Amino acid sequence: MLMNNIELDVKTKCIEEDKTQNEIAADVGTSAAYVSRIVNSKENIVNKTFIAMMESLGYDIRLTYEKRA
């Protein structure tokens, strides 16, 4: 099981960094619609098969975020 709520995590980080999803899209060279689709679909960020393999091994997945220095 993916323990993170990726949609909430991204939205929280956007607020913390005072950035919009549109600005992030421009930074990475993609459309705002694509960023929104990625944020709202956890399975696209962490592969469903990878999750199933880790669950089979008895693990849950938790992503951690570390601010670069």
Image: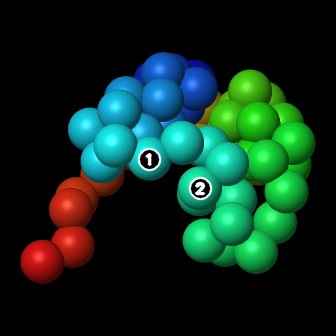
Numbered-mark total: 2
Q: What SS does tag 1 mark? A: loop
Crowding around mark 2 (Cα neighbors within 10 Å: few <14, some 14 to 19, many 20+) is some
> Where is residue 22 shown, x and y percent of the image?
67, 48
Does the residue at mark 2 contact the one at mark 1 (Cβ under 8 Å)? Answer: yes
Q: Would you say residue 44 is visible in this rendering?
A: no
> Where is residue 26 shown, x and y percent of the image?
69, 66
> Where is residue 1 shown, x and y percent of the image?
57, 24
Question: In the rendered view of the protein, which quadrant contains the C terminus?
Answer: bottom left
Q: Is residue 14 above or below residue 47?
A: above
Give 16 or 62, whichever is nearer the viewer: 16
> Where is residue 47 shown, x and y percent of the image?
77, 48
Q: Is residue 44 above or below residue 67?
A: above
Q: Is residue 6 left or right of residue 48?
A: left
Q: Is residue 39 above or below residue 65?
A: above
Residue 59's disc is none
Q: Would you say residue 40 is visible in this rendering?
A: yes
Give 34 or 47, whichever is nearer the viewer: 34
Please report the residue visible at 58 percent of the width from the left and 26 percent of the height from the top: 7
Q: Which residue is mark 1?
A: 19
Q: Is residue 61 above or below residue 29?
A: above
Check disc 2 and give the amino acid type: Glu
Please report the residue visible at 21 percent of the width from the left and 62 percent of the height from the top: 67
Crowding around mark 1 (Cα neighbors within 10 Å: few <14, some 14 to 19, many 20+) is few
Q: Which residue is mark 2?
A: 23
Q: What is the distance, in whole Å, between disc 2 and disc 1 at their CAs?
A: 6 Å
Check disc 1 and give the amino acid type: Lys
The colour scheme is rainbow
Give 65 or 53, whichever is nearer the viewer: 65
